[in-house]
Image (spheres, helix red, strand yellow):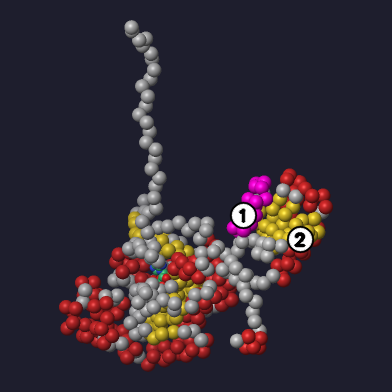
Amino acid sequence: MNTPKTNKPTPAPAKKAPQPLGLVRGMRDILQTDWPYWRQAFDKAQELCDAYGLDRIETPVLEETPLFVRGVGKQTDIVEKEMYTFETAGGEHVTMRPENTVGICRSYIHHGMFNQPQPVKMWYWGPMFRHERPQSGRYRQFWQYGCEIIGEQDAVVDAQLALLAWRFLKDLGIDSVVRINSIGTPESRVNYRNALVAYFRPKRNRLSEDDKRRLLKNPLRILDSKDPAIADLKAEAPQIVDWLDEPSKNHFMRVLEYLDEVGVPYQLDPFLVRGLDYYTQTVFELYDTSETEESAQSALGGGGRYDGLMELLGGRPTPAAGFAIGVDRVVSKLKNIQGGLPPKKVDVFVAQLGEAGRKKALAMFEELRMAGLKVGESFAKGAIKAQMDIANRMGARYTLIVGQKEVLDGTAIIRDMDAGTQEIVDARKIVQVVQKKMAQALPLVNTGTWAQPEVPPEQGAQNS
Ligand code: HAM
């Protein structure tokens, strides 16, 4: 039997489902669950900078490439191998900033900030880009919180900056130590450089290829070498403090005296030279004290004085100092300290039952929010159980429950989420009720748990 011919079109070949795209190597997402920690760090930076009289500045992520080559230094790792540099469609040679001190100096010159009362004190917070080998605590896009004080050469500024960096960590619950050194003026460094070359040259067969290259191009950087095979060589090497001129020695002594005065813990580190070429005099880095010296490979922050940088960038000679903290590293510490519990997000959660309850709850949310309380809700959910789960996840101290009956009675149920107790309160006085309870409650610490009440000293002594 002949089968009737049909005019069916031949089916198109099945389309391949598109593969999801991954992340660019060394990049990462900062997710919603991370944000509460980032926010704590940001709020602390803002609070301290307000208190110390630093104003926020934002400079572009893209700058002309020569800015970094000149400012950070041709022979630094950053410029030699870590910059994201490209040519734009318009033929400009640009680089995604690997750090922000030179950008701030460019901005200072560009806007004639030398005409403002000196020093100009600025702070920034933003992403930096370095094409480094990604590993834990080392990303290709990372965030820095930085402070720069421009137009003042007194040693008190260096100490105050180290204090501010240390205080930032301390207030976030991270105990740190400031490792500090002085690399003097460029003139005093020439003699030291010669002494260092004279010391390492006869021993060059013990140096790695990298360190041999450093010996030729930038001998101070050998002191920064992480090669364990030359630890003993480094220990015997001439120390820069012995080569400092009198003014540099005095400057350094004064920085240390100021640090003593304010109780900032520091360690003298004769090998600290930092990986950027613009530094003069004081250099410092901050390390978590809970880590051993070997495990503390990665500094939480670093900075120092850079009196010659402005001139190098075409500005007038202007003394300056600053620091930057690696926010990614700080946030990772915060998470460890706080046990992964997200910090409390809301004071009070408004839960509702039924349409009348939802209407009333909507208005109550707005009333509480306008009174300055942090309020949570999940109005699209009907079941009370689901709403209570969300209230818990938000870390609410209290939950208000409004159903049909409460609407009719002009009341609300207030539930203490930690104690598990609840009572009926007057809905018209809801703001006062919640505020009173909040004021009476124990202060919260960032761990998302209740803080222990402070024991007055005399009582503490009796108890111990
Ligand atoms: P820096 O030492 O290159 O200094 O960077 C400061 C901090 O940024 C480091 O201590 C570290 O915590 C963080 N950091 C650096 N690279 C990475 C990375 N690949 N991934 C994660 N975190 C990183 C400067 O940038 C200077 N501009 C500091 C300064 C300001 N000096 C004077 N004023």
The x, y position of residue 401, in whole percent, is: 72, 54
Q: Is residue 276 left or right of residue 56?
A: left
Q: Is residue 382 magenta?
A: yes
Residue found at the very far right of the displayed protein = 409
Give residue 124's position: percent from left, percent from top: 50, 68
Q: Residue at x 31, y 71 (%)?
A: 76
Please state the extent of the stretch shown in magenta in the rendering: 380-394
Quarter of the image for the N terminus: give it.
Answer: top left
Front residue (pair 106, 197): 197
Magenta stretch: includes residue 140: no
The residue positioned 38% from the left and 15% from the top of the image is 7
Task: Using the numbered discs, state the Cα–Cα distance from disc 1 to disc 2 in whole angstroms.
Answer: 21 Å
Asked if residue 187 lies left or right of residue 369, the reply is: left
Residue 317 visible here: no
Residue bearing the label numbered 1: 390
Quarter the C terminus occupies: bottom right
The residue identified by callout 2 is: 423
Question: Which mark lies nearer to you, 1 or 2?
Answer: 2
Q: Quadrant of residue 193?
A: bottom left
